[in-house]
Image (spheres, rainbow, N blue to C red):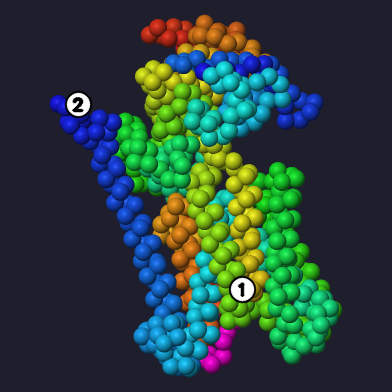
């Protein structure tokens, strides 16, 4: 009787197995629904962010302004100020969250992020060197900070990127040389953070007040200072890194389940770890180089989503990306509304929002 | 068929761990690898999986050198159950689906999902499909780990201490599941083990490692009181119970 039933349907699958597949199909649809919901949250936050400011705009104004069909003032506000800033928040949030997610997957450590691995500190050191040491070499640069503005943003961004990648290179070189465990790699990152912070402090100690102010201003982070070209570069890097990480989603699932298992499933654990760290660092470094230090997004966004969706990187990666965009959009809005018309530094706001959230996650059990 | 010929391996230059180890994993056999802690049992498995390269000798898979195959090819032929794996926030279904990774291009197919559902059902895990791995008991967890190896549909199954930290009932259950794959599907299995009686109950080949060499290798006749004394330095009495050998510690 049982065999008859089986042959009527699919001979390979027993009825109970069909039930399992049906239940799994429902579970997958739920994941997709959460992703769609997150995308909707990002869109709503982006629209709110576009509408608030020194003068409010309706959704119709925003749509018209985005395509240059509103009045000249609205066109200018949307196209030159708000849309680039909102797009920067979305792209930077996606890139930082994806990088944090990839660090946490490959190092199997919930504390891994650009901030805790010394990459942000490397960028700050690079920016300090650019502003304080190289500024004098830039024609018209040296005293042109006028208190707080960096002389040549391109050189500052380049040096910040170089500093971040230097930190990455040191971590990878030492970890390869000594065959370090993921735990040791994170500790190495902590040591490098201290080293680069010390370097930044020393460079600042010998600088003039205006240069120190310029460095401090740079580290505050600012989504509004990103140019269209820089935004395009960030978007390209974020898209390429997203494709790379998503391609490796099953490898991350395997590594997180155990290195021995991953080896047995044909995953080159060292290869995936090395390449993912390079790509994650390139993505995070690009954002930091253009926007300055943006704390906690890379750490907190994957953690929130891990609790909501589990540790399946097929969903954790896109969900973290969307959460990163949402967190940065929300933080950017707070920067603009708390003491308007003053704009608060984004690095402080992401930390103020992120730190309590992170502490709450710790109390709820970070392993989940 | 998986075959190891004269394998040699050392972690430190002057301290060879394995000096000359040969074995054949015939289809439909279940081999227990036995020996003291640190004698190189797990290292031998890592050489058989290709995770480590031997410094002497070679591993052949169906007559071809294992070292020349790429990782995915190897994973399609050899399933490995590691000694350590982590409970995480993956569902049981997704965790078992990982076993199909060597066959995936970029995403699992309907056939991959069907195989997972079928194996979960066969192992009585259908009701656990959407539970998270870190919510399972030790016995349930290890059964899922075995399910992940079974969905690889390989001819060879290598297990590193598969019954670690399990209660006696779950130890028997896990070994019986492997033995069933050996019996019903003709899988050639090798398990690193410490429990001699568990091995005697479920395995049909026994390989004793000592001082980097194969000290004894054969059927149940290879497991004698003298052999146990040579390897572990303990006295046992070997008796026959229901047609099976049993070691009684003295």
SS for dot 2 = helix
The label on residue A230 is 1
Q: Are marks 1 and 2 on the same chain?
A: yes
SS for dot 1 = helix
Q: At 60% from the left edge and 7% from the top edge, which residue is drawn?
A: B226
Q: Quadrant of residue B229?
A: top right
Q: Chain of mark 2?
A: A
Closer-to-camera residue (B107/B218): B107
In what quadrant of the picture does the N terminus of chain A appear?
Answer: top left
From the top left corner, tell me how far across and down residue B10 is, in percent: 72, 27
From the top left corner, tell me how far across and down residue A353 is, in percent: 52, 74
Q: At 54% from the left edge and 9% from the top edge, which residue is drawn?
A: B218
CB under 8 Å between discs 1 and 2 = no
Q: At 44% from the left edge and 52% from the top edge, which residue is drawn?
A: A314
Q: Which residues are magenta?
A: A338-348
Queried whether the magenta region covers residue A347, the answer comes back as yes
From the top left corner, tell me how far across and down residue A195 is, in percent: 76, 64
Q: Is residue A118 left or right of residue B42?
A: right
Q: Is residue A134 left or right of residue A69?
A: right
Residue under label 2? A3
Q: Quadrant of residue A218?
A: bottom right
């Amino acid at each position: 009787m049982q065999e008859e039933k089986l042959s009527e349907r699919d001979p390979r699958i027993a009825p109970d197995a069909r039930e399992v597949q049906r239940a799994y199909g429902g579970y997958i649809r739920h994941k997709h629904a959460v992703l769609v919901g997150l995308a909707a949250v990002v869109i709503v936050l982006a629209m709110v962010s576009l509408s608030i400011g020194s003068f409010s705009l309706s959704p119709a104004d925003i749509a018209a302004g985005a395509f240059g069909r509103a009045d000249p003032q609205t066109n200018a506000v949307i196209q030159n100020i708000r849309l680039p800033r909102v797009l920067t928040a979305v792209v930077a949030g996606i890139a930082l969250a994806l990088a944090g997610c990839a660090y946490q997957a490959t190092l199997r450590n919930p504390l891994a992020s650009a901030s805790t691995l010394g990459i942000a500190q490397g960028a700050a050191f690079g920016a300090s060197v650019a502003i304080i040491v190289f500024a004098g070499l830039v024609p018209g640069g040296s005293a042109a900070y006028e208190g707080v503005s960096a002389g040549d943003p391109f050189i500052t961004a380049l040096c910040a990127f170089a500093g971040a990648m230097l930190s990455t290179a040191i971590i990878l070189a030492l970890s390869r040389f000594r065959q370090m465990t993921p735990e040791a790699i994170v500790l190495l990152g902590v040591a490098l953070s201290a080293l680069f912070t010390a370097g930044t402090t020393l460079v600042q100690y010998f600088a003039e007040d205006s240069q120190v102010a310029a460095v401090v201003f740079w580290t505050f982070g600012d989504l509004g200072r990103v140019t269209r070209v820089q935004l395009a570069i960030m978007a390209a890097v974020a898209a390429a890194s997203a494709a790379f990480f998503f391609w490796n989603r099953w490898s991350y699932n395997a590594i997180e389940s155990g290195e021995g298992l991953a080896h047995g499933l044909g995953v080159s654990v060292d290869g995936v770890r090395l390449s993912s760290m390079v790509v994650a660092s390139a993505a995070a470094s690009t954002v930091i180089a253009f926007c300055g230090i943006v704390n906690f997004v890379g750490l907190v966004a994957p953690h929130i989503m891990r609790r909501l969706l589990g540790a399946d990187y097929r969903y954790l990666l896109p969900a973290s990306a969307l959460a990163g965009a949402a967190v940065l959009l929300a933080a950017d809005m707070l920067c603009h509304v708390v003491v308007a018309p003053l704009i608060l530094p984004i690095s402080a706001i992401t930390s103020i929002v992120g730190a309590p959230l992170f502490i709450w996650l710790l109390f709820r059990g970070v392993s989940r | 068929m998986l075959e190891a010929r004269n394998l040699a391996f050392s972690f430190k230059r002057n301290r060879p761990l394995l000096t000359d180890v040969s074995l054949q994993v015939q289809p439909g056999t279940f081999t227990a690898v036995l020996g003291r802690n640190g004698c190189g049992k797990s290292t031998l498995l890592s050489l058989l999986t290709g995770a480590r390269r031997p410094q002497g000798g070679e591993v052949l898979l169906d007559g071809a050198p294992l070292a020349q195959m790429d990782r995915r090819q190897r994973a399609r032929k050899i399933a490995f159950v590691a000694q350590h794996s982590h409970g995480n926030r993956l569902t049981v279904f997704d965790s078992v689906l990982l076993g199909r990774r060597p066959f995936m291009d970029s995403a699992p197919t309907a056939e991959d999902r069907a195989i997972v559902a079928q194996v979960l059902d066969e192992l009585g895990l259908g009701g656990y499909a959407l539970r998270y791995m870190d919510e399972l008991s030790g016995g349930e967890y290890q059964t899922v780990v075995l399910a992940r190896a079974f969905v690889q549909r390989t001819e060879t199954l290598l297990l590193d201490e598969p019954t670690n930290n399990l209660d006696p009932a779950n130890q028997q259950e896990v070994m019986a599941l492997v033995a069933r794959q050996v019996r019903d599907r003709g899988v050639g299995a090798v398990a690193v083990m410490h429990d001699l009686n568990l091995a005697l109950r479920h395995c049909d080949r026994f390989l004793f490692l000592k001082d980097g060499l194969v000290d004894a290798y054969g059927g149940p006749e290879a497991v004698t009181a003298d052999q146990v004394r040579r390897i572990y330095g303990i006295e046992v009495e070997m008796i026959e119970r229901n047609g099976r050998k049993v070691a009684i510690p003295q």
